[in-house]
């Protein structure tokens, strides 16, 4: 099994989490967005980013176990 798709998926999820967090802070995004300056999306973005990091780590472990 090639772990590159797992790692890429984790990176994409982590980037989405960062975007959601920045929208919650009001840094990026349109003012009309329901996420804009909403504190709930700050927390959601952090959680989504952490899930992405876990997926990246899973892909890394799979790659290392495959090479052993």
Image: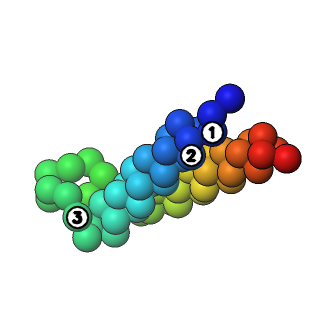
Identify which residue, 66 or 58, lies in the foreground: 66
Image-quadrant location for residue 66: top right
The answer to whether mark 2 and mark 1 are in CB contact below 8 A is yes
Percent x, y of residue 21: 40, 61
Query: Extreme front residue here?
Result: 67
Q: Residue 3 — which label?
A: 1
Residue annotated with mark 3: 28
Instruction: Label 2, secondary structure: give it.
Output: helix
**Residue 20 seen from this side:** yes
Instruction: Tell me the quarter of the image containing the N terminus.
Output: top right
Q: What is the spatial separation of the Cα atoms under label 2 and label 1, in whole angstroms?
A: 6 Å
Q: Residue at x 66, y 45 (%)?
A: 59
Q: Residue 37 — which label?
A: none
Image-quadrant location for residue 62: top right
Which one is earlier in the sequence, the residue at label 1 or at label 3? 1
Percent x, y of residue 6: 58, 39
Q: Is 37 above or below relative to 64?
A: below
């Amino acid at each position: 099994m090639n772990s590159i798709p797992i790692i890429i998926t984790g990176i994409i999820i982590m980037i989405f989490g960062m975007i959601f967090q920045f929208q919650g802070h009001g840094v990026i995004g349109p003012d009309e967005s329901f996420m804009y300056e909403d504190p709930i999306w700050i927390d959601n973005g952090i959680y989504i980013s952490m899930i992405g990091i876990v997926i990246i780590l899973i892909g890394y472990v799979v790659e290392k176990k495959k090479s052993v």
